[in-house]
Amino acid sequence: MSPDPINGVLLVDKGPDMTSHDVVAVARRTLNTKKIGHCGTLDPMATGLLILVIGKATKIQDLLMSEDKEYTGSLELGKTTNTQDAEGTVETECEVRDFSEDEIRAAFEQFKGDFYQTPPMVSAIKMDGVPLYKLARQGKVVVREPRFVHVYSYRIDGIHLPCVEFTVKCSKGFYVRTYAYDIGGLLGCGAHLKSLRRTRSGKFDLERSVTFEELKHGDRNEIISKMLTLPEVSRLRGA
């Protein structure tokens, strides 16, 4: 006998070294349901909020994916990598001089409001039906169309050269890896994203989230009790 159908939104605090697809696969097994999707991929090195839509909630997947995001992260000056983050191969190294806080803040200021951002080669964006990351694995580099993005606000949380800790609130489709890379380019020494954590997506945050371990080893009914129902989601979003 198949279990009762479930519908709603589950907030998961994704750990490092796993893909968003891994989280969905575990959720399917734990909840014993096939109709699950996620709202916005997190890279394996990134942690934090991953929104899972289950059952009838899959109908609002695109709506939830289109909302603004907030991240905390750190960038490391002086090194660029082929993926623009710490998981890639170092491509360039440069000595990092003793930048002042004003110089670093001025670089961040250049990437505020509306601007165009060129997506990284290692991304899921498709060209002629092929994800860019697959072309990158073949050693190919292709011209990427710049994307219009928006940074609503940023905060510099700490400067411990060569590392800079920050918080950024941004639009859908924003690459924080590229943000770090571009800031390093503007400072003239290069940079890559060292760490990343998504703390908010639209009206959702980590307060009602479950960890990956809870999702993997938890009881089905217990996990269901932590889900947001569709009426709750509607009220939360002010719809």
Image (cartoon, grey):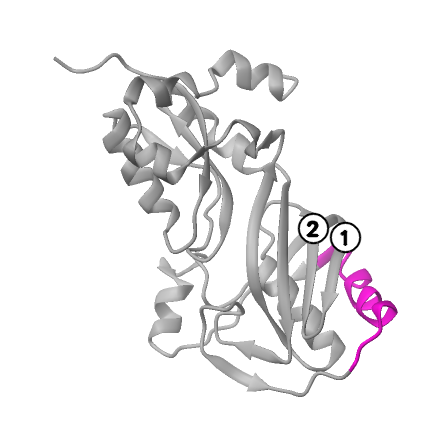
Residue 56 figure quarter: top left
Q: Residue at x 63, y 61 (%)?
A: 74
Foreground residue, 190 or 77? 77
Is 97 placed left or right of 143 in the picture? right
Foreground residue, 59 or 229? 229
Which image quarter holds the C terminus? top right
Foreground residue, 130 or 50? 50
Magenta stretch: residue 99 in it?
A: yes
Residue 171 spot, x, y in % from top left: 65, 45
Residue 97 spot, x, y in % from top left: 76, 84
Tell me, yes or no, whether the two marked residues, 1 and 2, touch with CB atoms within 8 Å. yes
Residue beneath label 1, please? 155
Is 90 placed left or right of 18 in the picture? right
Measure the C-alpha gap from mark 1 to mark 2: 7 Å
Question: What kind of residue is marked 1?
Answer: Arg
Residues drawn in magenta: 98-115
Tell me which numbered mark, 1 or 2, is placed earlier along the sequence.
Answer: 1
Q: Residue at x 59, y 79 (%)?
A: 79
Residue beneath label 2, please? 168
Residue 182 spot, x, y in % from top left: 67, 69
Question: What kind of residue is marked 2?
Answer: Val
Element on which disc 1 rests: strand
Q: Residue at x 34, y 45 (%)?
A: 21
Placement of 44 over or under 52, stated as above or below: below
Dot 1: within a 10 Å radius of its alpha carbon, few (fewer than 14), some, or many (20 or more) residues? Answer: few
Residue 54 figure quarter: top left
